[in-house]
Amino acid sequence: MDEQQAIARLKQGNLTGLEFLVQQHQVKAVHTAYLIIGDPALAEDVVQTVFLRLAQKIDQFDDDRAFRPWFFRAIVNDAIKAARCQKRAVSLEDSSEAIIPWLLDTAPRPEELAEASDLRLMVWNALQRLPPEQRAVIVQRHFLEMSEAEMVEKLQRPASTIKWWLHSARKSLKSLLGDYATGDDHEKR
Amino acid sequence: MKNDNLNVILTDLAEHAKPAAQIDLWPTLKENLTMSDGQPNKGKPIMNPKPVLSRAALAALALILVFAILLASPQGQAFAQELLKYFTTTSQKWLPAWPMPAPVPTYALEVEAVPQPSSLDMPDCGPVISPISSTFLCQLNDAQSKLGFIIKSFPAEYVDATFHVMEIDLENKAIRLSFLGEDASYSIAQGLGDFPVEPMGYAVHQDAIQLTQVGEYPAEYAAGSFVFSEDMSMTWDPTAPHYQVRWKEAGYWYSVGMSLHGLSPQSIGLTPAGVKEKMILIAENLVTLVQGPNQLTAGSQPSIKDRAGFNVKEPGLLPKNFHQVPDGSWSLLIPNKVDMMYEYTENGKAVGSLQFSQIPLPANEETLRWEFSQFYHGDPGETDFIVDEEVQINGRVGHYLVPAGEFSPYALYWQDDEREYILICFWSLEFGGRLSKEDLIVIAENLR
């Protein structure tokens, strides 16, 4: 079965179509939502909700459009909304349960691995300090690997606005990351 | 950090927080889909639920009907006109693409390079206002004497921004001031008489207008704007982070605008209602020159020349018919960058422009070249210029850069011991003349 066949089945009320789409996209979708929201459980809820909505409104989906961009746009939008609704931004301290022990793992290991862990910690910390919208821009560009042209189309904003957001998000990330922001410096360390 | 590194780290972070092997949404999803009010939905299509009007929707519909009846009456029509007084409005939510002028064949401009008056030596508040060496106060004072009325500007107490540019319309006795802040850009326009009719792209959808007050004066507030789609048509977006408040006072019209650099009011910690309150607060607290420089946003801002922190250079020679325009700016994108703009006019009409930018070294990885690639290509580091030709500028290596796209701007990029420079040429599609690579090199070799 391919995506088009899955969508056609879903339109007929056949849940195997939805099951196919879920299996195809759930991992990337949950990871995308997680990077924007910072909470894995909430990320799963968001993705569940988008799949439910998809099932209920599949008749409105235009078969001529590509499914993946449409679906991930919904994931990103819902993740931004969820991130805004959180009582407070997920800070380094807040998210300690799952990720911090791993990030701060001090077990002896080769220098290279220790440095990689430092860098992950800094990226995570920096990402969580960005507003949800800027986080989403970084995630779309660098995790979903959307081109700027795709982002212009998906976000329905002028190219100049997308460029501004990307620049602004990267600038914030860079300032938060300090020395690590300049890639060559890091590689030389 | 390299972009592909960032991808790896993000993937790593997400995978560690929620390993792919542990993600299986289907069982819960299936359960949710097949259960309705606790009853299995066996054999029934899950889609196309019959739409049912909720009480809230019915109430909204009733309100809409009341308004429709009200607006159909003579009193209602008067009310509608009252609502639509200050903004140029439209009932359309989609505007077709603006017709693009047909490009004409290009040719090399053969104009003599002539010595330029130095904008850096012009007196700060002399008869000619330099966009580089004059302060905001100087330009404001000059604009007041030209227009013959007291100009209101932003209060330093509520707007933290730097002055960007001033546009004066002597014919219609109007002025627009633009400022750039960290999170938003601000503008204030004002003039004698009635609000000008604006081009459709600047219109506001009629549903966006809200009546309000600025002090004792009736005012209108609107959020949203028309945004470009890929095909260059425009669609009204009520969530676009662009906000305006307009009112009239003592024979003058005023329009205060704010555009957020982020996606939404939340990006600056405000709700939509909070933005409206902020806009009205700003509008009610506008200040004038007589209240003192410290009361004005950018009132104490030094000139671009003085803020640069280095000796600004400028072209000593430019092709005839190029004139400096007051768009010299202090870049938000790159600290310490100074931009100077020159327009090329033919038959009184600007048909091309030349942007000259400089930044002191050590710049980070060819910053100005990076910025040019950002705006006309995409990612930093991409080298998809269709022409990237090494040239000699006063014995040093420079680069002549032409991006893809027949009508894109093109540039000359170089460095000396002190700083990076870039000269970028923009031309109207309706005008065929172009400066050549050699013309740009002559300009580059004659800085002072």
Image (cartoon, coloured by chain):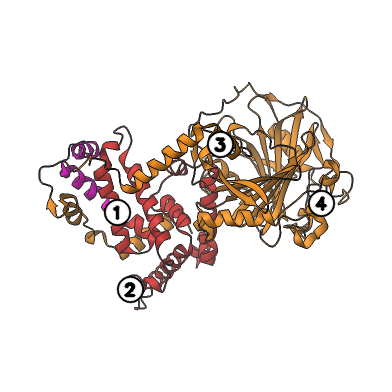
Chain colours: A red, B orange
Chain ID, mark 4: B
Q: Can residue B272 be seen from the camera position used here? A: yes
Is residue B198 shown in magenta? Answer: no
Q: Quadrant of residue B190?
A: top right
Q: CA distance from mark 3 to mark 1?
A: 44 Å
Q: Along the horizontal axis of the image, is B86 left or right of A94?
A: right
Counting from the top left corner in percent of width and height, residue B178 is at 69, 48
Q: Along the horizontal axis of the image, is B294 left or right of A127?
A: right
Residue drawn 45% across the image and 58% down it = A132
Q: Which residue is mark 4?
A: B134
**Of the residues shown, which amino acid type is indicated by label 3?**
Ala
Q: Which residue is mark 3?
A: B80
Identify the element where label 2 is drawn.
Answer: loop
- Count residues near mark 1 (Cα–Cα under 10 Å), then give few for <14, some for 14-19, many for 20+: many
**Of the residues shown, which amino acid type is indicated by label 2?**
Glu
Q: CA distance from mark 4 to mark 1?
A: 55 Å
Q: Which residue is mark 2?
A: A97
Nearer to us in this view, B133 or B205: B205
